Image (cartoon, coloured by chain):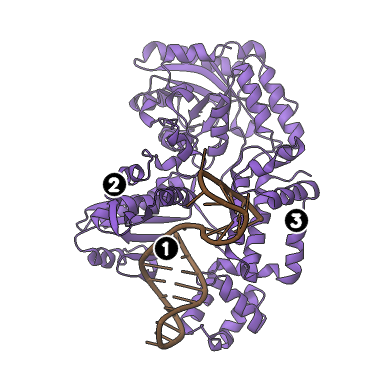
Chain colours: A purple, B brown
Amino acid sequence: MAITNSEIAKIFNEYADLLEIKGENPFKVRAYRNAARTVENIGKPLEELVESGYDLTKLPGIGTDLSLYIKEIVKTGKFSKLEQLKEEIPPTLVEMLSIEGLGPKRIKTLYEQLHIQSMEDLRRAAESGEIEKLPGFGPTLVEKILRGVRLAKKAGHRFKWSEAKEYVDDLLAYLRQIELTHLEVAGSFRRKKETVGDLDILATAKDFSEVIRHFVKYPKIKEVVSAGSTRSTVILQNDLQVDLRSVEDESYGSALHYFTGSKQHNIAVRKLAIELGLKVNEYGVFRGEQRIAGRTEEEVYKAVGLCYIEPELRENRGEIEACKAGKLPKLIEQKDIRGDLHMHTVYSDGKHTIEDMAKAAKEMGYEYIAITDHSKRLTVAKGLDEKRVLQEFEEIDKINEKINGITILKGMEVDILEDGSLDMSNEVLAQMDVVLVAVHYKFNLSKEKQTARILKAFDNPHVNILAHPTGRMIQMREPIEIDMEKILQKAKENNIFMEINAQPERLDLNDIHIKMAKDMGVKMAINTDSHNIFSLYYMQYGVNQARRGWCEKDDIINTRDLKNLKKLLKR
DNA sequence: GCCGTTTTCGGCCCGACTGTTTTCAGTCG
């Protein structure tokens, strides 16, 4: 049974948690966390790297020890040091870290003084008044712990970016009711991460205390966690945490940079600053006591010898090196998109007609769309057989004749059957302008079989695009197991494109795979997979994801005009 | 535990807020 990179990362993170509770050297703890991050971010399975004899110490944050541990985990599926540590420190203590106000030190105290090992122990001791008697603990903290225990059950939820966007729009409109100089959402939301854990909002105003007073009166607040003079934290009724912070205008740029993160990017920038004898914090860039930059982000980057780096790239995944080498991408923008190559109509499981979709797309300023209804295997979606799809194409011909300003391409989202053959005859496929293929069932095949299934589909000379390549649904369905590198390699050889599916719960490919594809020279298409006219606007989410994957206009085929697109679609 | 064009030892990002204290530890981001 193969072990995945994220499973290895999880092992290191759990080990780090336990080390921290044990009271180990915090830098050692950090080393394990850094290693976990590295492991998560390399697109290639570590299992393969180990097999090929790759020198793991070349990876950032992996030294002699950790490379040995990785090998051990890949070979045995287990990390013996973690197993040993679990004998010493009960692993159930880790779950208590999720409670607001409880960190490693306090958990250690609770364990050593009161033998508290689980959430249930914790609740009992808090209610009995035992915890309050401990030095360093008081009634307020106990209250907080009890609240934390109650909340822990539903913790860990992250909001889809699109979902967070709705809350952001409402909250910003509320905040703007009073006079502000600057107002910006920072954090992972600004970096356009596919999910957002909380919101970080930065504001400046003549009288900031008034902003805080206004903020904590927002009607959708469930609880005000803290409200200081420069920052405040609240929980909304939907359990979304919002942090509002403020600085002086002269620090606005550095604060925006600081609160946008990512943490790893900021650390890397600070290290650069230290090398130059500078200090970077949220108030500016300082040489000694003197502030030399801070009003804008551009200033901050310039002061540490860098160019401006787009928020979507700030993950410390090579953007700093790329900037120094003058190789930062010029990221794709929504206005570069000229069409949408994946959508459904009433012929299968869509809600609108071909003509409705075409008109809506025309209003978006598109030059072309492809109608790509499902094939017959997908009976739940009323998939089309050869005869029906040819009828659909006749209708497309008629609409193309009478409609102006947009061209409708004939396409289909064809099921890849279990054996890798396609759910449509070659004779009919040959009549299509664009052929999407996709996996819609048998998600749990072994990695070898699933990969072979898709590679076989790529042998069909009519295939153009692999739709939602991993099938994952954010926080709902795991991706199918495939060897992405092999698939990208063959896509490159056969001139097949990968889809970046813009449905907010899919966003498939993810950012790491997109960058992998880009680096391997595989081009992609950003498609909405719309089932009605309203979701055509999902395109923005797909563009966000493409930007996180370093895509430029040229990497995305539906930025081409129709003539050039057609050339690309001819294999 | 990692890392190094000053270093193979001695560093490792930085500050706000809270609750508990009476100057600060712990937590959080």
Quarter assignment of residue A369: top left
Which residue type does callout 3 highlight?
Answer: Phe
Which residue type does callout 1 highlight?
Answer: Gln
Q: Say whether marks 1 and 2 touch (CB < 8 Å).
A: no
How far across and how far down the image is residue A243, in percent? 38, 61
Q: The residue marked by circle 3 belongs to what chain? A: A
How far across and how far down the image is residue A208, in percent? 24, 63
Q: Say whether marks 3 and 2 touch (CB < 8 Å).
A: no
Mark 3 crowdedness (10 Å alpha carbons): few <14, some 14-19, many ≥20: some
Residue at the disc numbered 1: A237
A67 vs A135, nearest the viewer:
A67
How far across and how far down the image is residue A360, in percent? 37, 27
Image quarter of the C terminus of chain A: top right
Secondary structure found at label 1? loop
Q: Which is closer to the viewer, label 3 or label 1?
A: 3
Question: Which residue shows up at 38% across the image and 65% down it?
Answer: A233
Quarter assignment of residue A398: top left
Q: Which is closer to the viewer, label 1 or label 2?
A: 2
Residue at the disc numbered 3: A79
Mark 1 crowdedness (10 Å alpha carbons): few <14, some 14-19, many ≥20: few
- Answer yes or no: are tags 3 and 2 on the same subunit: yes
Left-right relation of A108 to A343: right
Residue A359 in view here: yes
Residue at the disc numbered 2: A296
